Each structure stands twice: as C-alpha cells, then as structure tokens.
Amino acid sequence: MNPIIQKLESLERLGWRFGLESVRALMRELYDPHQGLRFLHVAGSNGKGSTCAYLAAFLRQHRYRVGLYTSPHLSDLRERFRVNGRWIPEGDLRRLGASVLEACRAVRRKTGHLPTHFEALTVLAALWFKEQRVDWVVWEVGLGGRLDATNVIDAPAVSLITPVTLEHQDILGNGLFRIASEKAGIFKAGSLAATFQPRSQALDAVERAAARQGVPLWVGGKDFHFRREKEGFRWEGPGLAKSFQIPRLPDFQISNASLALAGIQLLQSRGVHAEPSRIQKALVETRWPGRLEVLCNNPLVVLDGAHNPAAAQALVSALKMKYPGKRWIVLNGFLRDKNYRDFCRILKPLTAFSVTTRPRSERAEAGEKVFRSWETQGVRGALVGDWRKALGLALAKAENSGFPLLITGSLYLLGDCRKELAGLKGLEKI
C-alpha cells in the first residue's frame, strides 16, 4: 500500500469526532475547497448509498459532470471518491492526500488534536471535486448529520433524508425522534428537501427540523407518491407522472430511486430540466456494489450490506421476490453497535446454515455472541474466527449442499470477501 494512503488510513484509530470545528479548520488550511461547489446532501439510516448512486446517475444522464462521495468503501479506499462513476486515480489520491496530511499537522499545531480519518477524507473529496470542476456533488453523510463532517458545507441545493431506524443510540441519542432530528440537522435555510419515512416518529422529527429552518420539504406519500407495477414502478409528483420499466427491482430500491427522483424534480428550480427518457436510462443502468450483488453463479453467491433489522426485512423481501423458495447458507459478522439479535430472527426463515465470523474491524462484535443469537433461533451453524476460513467453509457448504451463499451483516466482511473472490472487478466504474 502507498505510504500516503497508509498514513491517511492510520487516522482511523482516532475514531469519530462529532462537531464541525476540526473539519472547518482543515478546510481553511486548504483554502476552503468546498466553497463554490454545488451539493446534494443525503442523510438517513438505510439506502443512502443507493440513493446517492441514483442521484449521480440521473445527473450524468443529463450531461452534468458529477462528483460522488460515499462511505464506507468495500474493497479500496478510492471507491469513496468518484467523478462520473470513475474512482479517483491513485496518483491524485497520493498527491492530494499528502496535502491533506500536511494540513492535518497544521491543525494539530493550532488546536492540539489531529483531524480524524473521515474529516481528512471529506476534505480530500472537496479538493478533488474542485480540481475536477464538477457541476454537482452528491455528498453522503457518514454518521448522523448535524455534527457529521460532511455538514461543513453551506446550504446545499437539495437535502434528502432516507428512512431512519434505531442506530448508533450511544452517539445520536435514544429513540427514533432524536436520531431523526440529528440526521435532519443537515437542513439549512436556502435549501430544498425531500424525505421518505415509513415511521411516524421519524417523519415528525424531519418535518419539525425543516420547519425550523424554513426549508420546503416534500414528503413521500404526501407530496410525491410511488408504487410497484408489474415491470417496474410508477412515480407521481410535482411536474412528473410516469411509469418506469425496471423488472424485478426490489421494493427498497424502488423507495431509494423514488426519493432520488424527488431530489431531481426539486432541482428543476435550480435549472436542471429532467427528461423522462434520460431518467429511465439512468434507472436501468444504475448499480450499487454490495446491494443484492451477484458475485458468481456456480455456486450462486450474493452480497448484501444489510446490517440492521429494517435492512434485514428489506433483504428478506428482495430475496423472496428474486429467488422464490430458496434457502441460503448465510456468512455473517457484525459490528458491536448493530442489533444482530433481531437480524438473525428476521433472516431465520431463509437460513439453512449460518457461518459466523468476526469482521476485520476494531469495532467488530465477538463472533461468539452472534453465533449464540443464531443458536437461540434454532439455526444450525458454525463459528469460525478467521474470516478467510469462514468464507472457505461457507463456499464449501454451498457447493456441497446446493444452497446458494449469502454474505451479509457488515460491509467490512463484504468488502474482504468480495476482494478475495473477485478482486476489484466491477468497482472501478459504476
């Protein structure tokens, strides 16, 4: 690994820091590269990455040059930074990374602490997008919203909030209302906004946050509507009522695409004139690695980054629709702050055998605890500490039993397994 990338990644040991003082100081050291960029800012619990991918695809189809910043990555740090679907070249990452690291040292001299890994990468993204002269930046929140490093930007053109669930309660606060309030902290006067919230507490929090900032808010189910149709889905809202043909699109991707489409419709007032034919093309061509991604077919191996109960429900529904009647070998591992107990309960009906391991992360939950959750559900399984050996066992089980293999529970585990099985194939361009 390149020394500059190693030094950037070494900042990860600092963990998370909530508050904007440090990232603002780092931006100032580098002459505020975020100033002058036009942003679409996306927060929420589930579906942020897919929603961002749809937004970027819609804008690209309309001939805009689009920067896309997402996190975490699956197999390579460069995945987080993309322009028109292609990730940052290694030379640019080294060069800009060196500038960011020098600025980090300057911030430490002035403030007494180093910026975090995520703060450094967020500033690096702004530097690269400025250098690349992008027309729009699709900007995904890391964790929370109000105090997340991405919230260093001024008012974005559009802010979107994907469905909010209970997560990170030790950081974001207890209860759905408080968590949703933190995520809606990305709202700023002068922006437009849209959300889709199946849970009323979360919707109440988002609506209140929008009202406080005077931000016009479109709400899915009230201001815009979408529904599944036989060969895709129909979207109806201000300025557009049309059916889109995307066969076998899972329900959760319909809601992600519909929220992104609301964002594009909101951009009409910012000079983006969306054409239905280009929207259709973007919908068909959009893909997001790690979400119901088929890695190989013999045996069938599917990767999905579901990591909480709401995402598990969506995953079960999607698997039932796409692979009716199938049961799965499930290779899984989780981070400590995830509700893996309910996750196991939800996946139980589709699980023929569970292979549990510990993802390669300092925040990983002990495999023994997750394994006991599967045992509590009465699911047969195995506990394998080393993720590579766990992958080998899971593949052997799939080959010998005829059951397909599902890898899920942690993006860290997904990324390692994906790289082991396919290298970086399919990641360099989306």
Image (cartoon, rainbow, N blue to C red):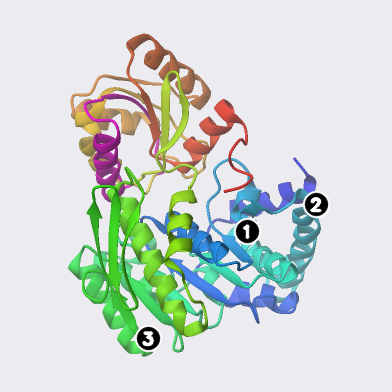
Q: Which residue appears at 79% of the width and 64% of the height?
A: 99
Check residue 219 for magenta coloring.
Answer: no
Q: Earlier in the sequence, mark 1 or mark 2?
A: 1
Q: CA distance from mark 1 to mark 2?
A: 18 Å
Which SS class for mark 2? helix
Q: Earlier in the sequence, mark 3 or mark 1?
A: 1
Residue 268 visible? The answer is yes
Q: Kindly report which numbered mark, 3 or 1, lies closer to the viewer in this rendering.
A: 1
Check residue 321 for magenta coloring.
Answer: yes
Q: CA distance from mark 3 to mark 1?
A: 29 Å
Tell me the number on the disc at residue 84. Answer: 1
Residue 61 at x, y percent in the picture: 54, 62
Where on the picture, by quarter, is residue 219?
bottom left
- Give the labeled residue for mark 3: 215
Q: Which residues are magenta?
A: 308-335
Q: Which residue appears at 73% of the width and 67% of the height?
A: 132
- Which amino acid is tagged 1? Asn
Q: Kindly report which numbered mark, 1 or 2, lies closer to the viewer in this rendering.
A: 1
